[in-house]
């Protein structure tokens, strides 16, 4: 009985993570957004003068997730996550985390905006990419890993 309830609870959590729509690209800048949220909505990134530090390919977890992610650094040591051909299922409360592993160990939230296609977002200065080398697409509301990429 306990096993059946656990399976039903997990199934409901997975179904619930597909109810919202992943944000689409927009050409207008919304009001009342943080600088990180505004950066996440832009879809092109100029690599001129940038140094490629790491890159990874997304793998499925509970939901199909694909595409590549790269980390670039500018001359001022500002780092940016650049998503290319990124695709994942929609879900409520999706986040992008940097973590030590797929189990969300020692994670830092990069943004709460996740969208399909090409986009980029500034990496917080306190992120340690030597340790936090996994990019996670995480459903915070249900603690579900949609997909991940290991930065190498």
Image (cartoon, rainbow, N blue to C red):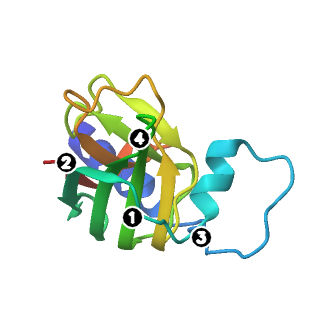
The residue indicated by pointer 4 is 75
Give how far apart the Cα atoms at labels 4 and 2 are.
Answer: 21 Å
Disc 3: which residue: 21
- Front-lying residue, 146 or 27: 27
Q: Are marks 2 and 1 in contact (CB under 8 Å)?
A: no
**Comparing marks 2 and 3, which lies closer to the viewer?**
2
Q: Nearer the viewer, mark 4 or mark 2?
A: 4
Q: Is residue 115 visible?
A: yes
Which residue in the protein does label 2 denote? 151
Label 4 or label 1, whichever comes before in sequence order? 4
Query: Is disc 4 surrounded by few (<14), some (14 to 19) or many (20+) residues within 10 Å?
Result: few
> In the orientation shown, which residue stands out farthest toward the left?
152
Q: Nearer the viewer, residue 128 or 110?
A: 128
Q: Secondary structure at mark 3?
A: loop
Of the numbered discs 2 and 1, the one sitting upstream in the chain is 1
- Which residue appears at 39% of the width and 56% of the height? 49
- Residue 83 circle label: 1
């Amino acid at each position: 009985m306990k096993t059946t309830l656990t399976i039903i609870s997990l199934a409901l959590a997975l179904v619930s993570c597909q109810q919202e729509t992943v944000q689409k690209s927009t050409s207008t800048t919304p009001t009342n957004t943080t600088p990180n949220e505004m950066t996440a909505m832009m879809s092109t990134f100029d690599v001129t003068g940038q140094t490629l530090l790491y890159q990874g390919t997304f793998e499925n977890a509970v939901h199909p997730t694909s595409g590549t992610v790269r980390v670039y650094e500018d001359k001022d040591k500002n780092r940016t996550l650049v998503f290319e051909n990124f695709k994942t299922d929609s879900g409520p409360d999706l986040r992008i985390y940097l973590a030590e592993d797929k189990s969300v160990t020692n994670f830092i939230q990069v943004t709460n905006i996740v969208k399909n296609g090409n986009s980029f977002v500034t990496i917080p200065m306190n992120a340690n990419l030597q340790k936090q080398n996994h990019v996670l697409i995480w459903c915070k509301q249900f603690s579900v890993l949609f997909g991940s990429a290991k930065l190498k």
